[in-house]
Image: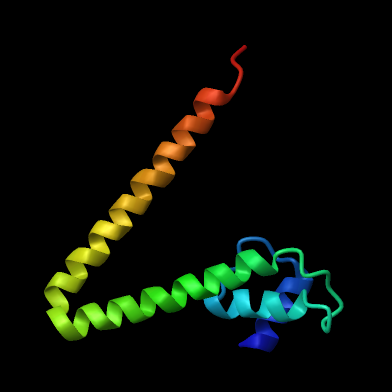
Amino acid sequence: MGVRNSTIRRLAVPDLTTTVLTMTLTGLAADSSLGGGDNAQAPRRVAAVAAMLLGGFAGAAAFLHAGAGPTLVIGSVAVLAAGALFWAAKQSRRLDQPTG
């Protein structure tokens, strides 16, 4: 998967979906000093990987302690909240655009 993602990154094919975590890790490696890059996005990518790891542990812990039902409810609420926040941010940017 890493070779595939590296190839896709080099080809710069738009809207070609790949696995998010693998692509993020590939980006870290490809843009590192050893990979000939400048590490410009390294902090953001490391934070993204850490967030995915923590989310996985939180989901597993919720499932083990509360079961599937409550875990799905918690996940659904989190997705809806994130969607609402992104929608609100998009609306806020629209308000900031000059008219006319």
- Image colouring: rainbow
Is 31 displayed left or right of 59 in the figure? right
Q: Residue furthest right?
A: 36
Percent of width and height locating residue 49:
53, 75
The number of callouts visible is: 0
Is 70 displayed left or right of 21 in the figure? left
Of 14 and 80, nearer the camera is 80
Percent of width and height locating residue 16:
61, 67
Q: Where, by quadrant of the figure, is residue 60 drawn?
A: bottom left
Give the residue displayed 29% in from the left and 59% down from the top: 78
Give the residue displayed 62% in from the left and 69% down from the top: 45
Is 20 displayed left or right of 28 in the figure? left
Q: Residue furthest top?
A: 100
Relative to 30, is 17 above or below? above
Relative to 85, is 50 above or below? below
Q: Is residue 92 visible?
A: yes
Of 93 and 42, nearer the camera is 42
Q: Where, by quadrant of the figure, is residue 58 drawn?
A: bottom left
Relative to 80, is 55 above or below? below
Percent of width and height locating residue 90:
48, 37
Give the residue displayed 45% in from the left and 74% down from the top: 52
Percent of width and height locating residue 14:
67, 61
Q: Quadrant of the C terminus?
A: top right
Q: Is residue 67 visible?
A: no
Q: Where, by quadrant of the figure, is residue 57 drawn?
A: bottom left
